[in-house]
Image: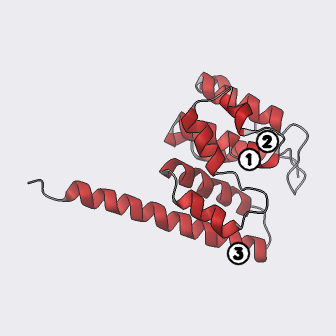
C-alpha cells in the first residue's frame, strides 16, 4: 500500500518547509515496513501536531533523522536552532540503548518532546500487528501520556492556588 501525502508546504512557515526538505532528503531511499516511502511517517506525525505550532511540526518532521539516517546532530545544528536540535536529540534512541531508558529520557525532557513522541508512537501503532513491539509502544505511549497529564495538572494546580 503506497500512501501519497500531497501537502502544500508553502502554507506553513519557511522553517517548516525547510525541515520537510531536510527530512525528505535524509530519508530519500528509505521505506516503511509496509513499503511506503519513509517520509510519509514524519509527515503524518507533523500533520497530527500542526495545531501545536511550527516548532512541534519541525521536530516531528526531523524526529527520526539522527536515529535512522547518516545525518548527525552537527548536520542539524547547521540548519536549525538549538531548541529544535535538542528536542530531536532527545527523541533519538542511541545504539544499544535500552528502550525503557530511552522513554525515561523523553519523560524528563520538554513537553514538546513528549508530545512529538506520543504522536510518533500513535502513528507507528497504525499498522503494527499485535505482539511484543505493539505492546512496547502501547506501554511507552501510556507512560508519556501519564507524564503529560501530571505536568498539566500540576501547572493547573499551581495557577489555581490563591495568591497571597
Gap in Å between the C-alphas at discs 2 and 3? Answer: 24 Å
- Asked whether residue 130 appears in the rendered view, the answer is no
Check disc 2 and report its element: helix, strand or loop. loop
Q: Residue furthest left?
A: 164
- Place of residue 163 in the rendered image (x, y in percent of width and height, measured from the top left): 12, 53
Circle 1 crowding by C-alpha within 10 Å: few under 14, some 14–19, many from 20: many
- Which of marks 1 and 2 precedes in the sequence? 2
- Place of residue 49 in the rendered image (x, y in percent of width and height, measured from the top left): 57, 45
Q: Which residue is mark 3?
A: 135
Gap in Å between the C-alphas at discs 1 and 3? Answer: 21 Å
Gap in Å between the C-alphas at discs 2 and 1? Answer: 10 Å
Circle 2 crowding by C-alpha within 10 Å: few under 14, some 14–19, many from 20: many
- Which of marks 3 and 2 precedes in the sequence? 2
Give the vertical position of 101 relative to 130 (above or below).
above
37 relative position to 77: left or right: right
Which residue sits at x=75%, y=42%? 65
Q: Which residue is mark 1?
A: 64
- Which of marks 3 and 1 precedes in the sequence? 1
- Residues tagged 2 and 3 counted as in contact (Cβ below 8 A): no
Which residue sits at x=24%, y=54%? 159
- Residues tagged 1 and 3 counted as in contact (Cβ below 8 A): no
- Place of residue 31 in the rendered image (x, y in percent of width and height, measured from the top left): 88, 48
Circle 3 crowding by C-alpha within 10 Å: few under 14, some 14–19, many from 20: some
Residue 39's mark? Answer: 2
Position of the C terminus by quadrant: bottom left
Check disc 3 and report its element: helix, strand or loop. helix
Check disc 1 and report its element: helix, strand or loop. loop
Which residue sits at x=86%, y=44%? 37
Which residue sits at x=81%, y=36%? 26
- Place of residue 158 in the rendered image (x, y in percent of width and height, measured from the top left): 25, 57
- Tell us which disc is closer to us: 2 or 1: 1
Give the vertical position of 124 relative to 59 (above or below).
below
Amino acid at each position: 500500500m503506497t500512501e501519497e501525502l500531497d501537502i502544500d508546504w508553502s502554507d506553513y512557515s519557511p522553517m517548516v518547509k525547510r525541515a520537510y526538505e531536510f527530512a525528505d532528503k535524509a530519508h530519500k531511499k528509505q521505506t516503511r515496513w509496509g513499503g511506503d516511502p519513509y517520509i510519509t511517517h514524519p509527515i503524518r506525525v507533523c500533520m497530527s501536531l500542526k495545531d501545536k505550532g511550527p516548532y512541534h511540526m519541525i521536530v516531528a518532521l526531523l524526529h527520526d533523522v539522527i536515529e535512522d539516517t547518516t545525518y548527525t546532530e552537527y548536520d542539524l545544528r547547521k540548519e536549525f536552532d538549538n531548541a529544535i536540535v535538542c528536542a530531536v536529540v532527545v527523541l533519538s534512541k542511541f545504539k544499544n540503548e535500552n528502550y525503557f531508558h530511552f522513554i525515561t529520557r523523553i519523560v524528563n525532557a520538554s513537553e514538546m518532546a513528549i508530545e512529538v513522541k506520543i504522536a510518533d508512537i500513535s502513528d507507528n501503532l497504525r499498522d503494527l500487528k499485535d505482539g511484543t513491539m505493539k505492546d512496547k509502544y502501547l506501554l511507552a505511549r501510556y507512560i508519556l501520556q501519564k507524564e503529560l497529564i501530571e505536568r498539566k495538572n500540576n501547572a493547573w494546580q499551581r495557577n489555581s492556588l490563591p495568591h497571597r
